[in-house]
Structures are given as C-alpha cells and as structure tokens.
Image (cartoon, rainbow, N blue to C red):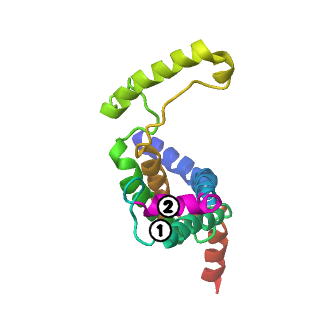
Amino acid sequence: MLRTMTQHYKAVLQRILHLDGLAPLLLRLYLAPVMMQAGWTKFQSFDSTVAWFGNADWGLGLPFPELMVVLAAGTELVGGALLIPGIAVRLVSIPLMATMVVAALTVHLEHGWLAIADSSSWLANERVLESAERLERAKNILQEHGNYSWLTGRGSLVVLNNGIEFAATYFIMLLTLLFTGGGRYTSVDFYVSRSLERD
C-alpha cells in the first residue's frame, strides 16, 4: 500500500513540476513594481535623496552620495524592469539583494523588525510601544478637530515604524530567485537557456 501511495505521489508530482515556473513568475511580478517604484522615487527626488544619503547628521552619511543614489536607483529601476519578462533573473537578483542589505543595515535595522508599528506584536520594541501612545493621541486630535470618518474612510491610521521587515522579505524573495531562476516556461531566461542547449 505504501509503495502504491508513493507511486501516485511521484506521478502527481511529475505533473505538477511542469507548473514550477509559476512560483518564480509570481515572485518576479510582485517584486518588479516594488523595486521599480523605489528606483523611480530616488530619481524623481534626486537632490533630496543625495542630501539624505550624504548627510551624516540627519541622513545616512554615505560616501559619494551622488554615485550611491545613481547605483541604487538604477539597480532598482533596471533590475525591476528586467524581472518582469524574466531576463537575467539570477544576475539581477544579486545587486537587488545588495541594495536590500544596505537598506536594512543603514536605514531600517535601528527600528527593529516591524515595518508598521503594532504594539500588540511580540516583536514590538520600545519605539513601537511608544508609538501606540502617539497614535492614540493623533486619533484623539483628529476626532476632535478633523473629519475623522473621512480620514479613516479608506483604512485605519497607522504609524510607520520602518523596521527591516520589508527589506528582509524582499531579500528572501530575491534569494529564492537567485536559486530558482526566472522560471520554467515563464521567463525569457528559460527560452534563451533552452536555445543555447540545442546549439
């Protein structure tokens, strides 16, 4: 009986494996707009981003801030665009992962894990716990002096904690793409590789 179950399992798995390109495709389509938007925003606000990258007092204090902005924004914009059709996915994943590591270490790490401040989370640090009081105070002010129902008509008010949660998640997704590639049947890389194998 166990042998029969194992044979059925393997037969089903063989059929499903023809769809294994769907997971990398979905990762690519999820990551592409995130990366492209990040790069586009840096280029759109180039001067202020350079100032933030370079200033050690209120910014990141990075050397060569103009170059760093061009490299980060270019990597995100071009890399994100290449993810859509699945071109050079493994190669593109490497510099995109590097930007996530730099972002996590220089911008987000000091704020802990959570991207959105949630004081009920077991991952809440002192900063997040303090933000609950600030959020409650902001709600009270808006309820008293503003149109609170209009302001919250599309969603609740939250405090951005800016922790490493998103950067770490994107890094893991990109690391997955580094190992899987663009995906069978769903990427340009697959067809280029197949064409080269025939030659």
Residue at figure coordinates x 37%, y 31% from the top left: 128
What residue does disc 1 label?
Answer: 65
Where is residue 24? Give x, y as percent. Answer: 57, 56
**Residue 3, visible in the rendered structure:** yes
- Residue 45 is a magenta residue: yes
Q: Nearer the viewer, residue 147 or 180?
A: 147
Image point (69%, 20%), residue name: 150
Specify the amino acid type for callout 1: Pro
Q: Answer whether labels 2 and 1 touch (C-beta < 8 Å).
A: yes
Looking at marks 2 and 1 on the same chain, the residue that comes earlier in the sequence is marked by 2
Judging by the rendered image, the residue that carries numbered circle 2 is 51
Q: Quadrant of the C terminus?
A: bottom right
Q: Disc 2 residue type? A: Ala
Question: In the visual, does 58 lie left or right of 198?
Answer: left
Q: Label 2: how many residues lie within 10 Å, few (<14), some (14-19) or many (20+)?
A: some
Q: Secondary structure at mark 2?
A: helix
Provide the residue span drawn in magenta. 42-55
- Is residue 180 visible in the rendered structure shown here? no
> Residue 103's quadrant in the figure?
bottom left
Q: Residue at x 63, y 65 (%)?
A: 86
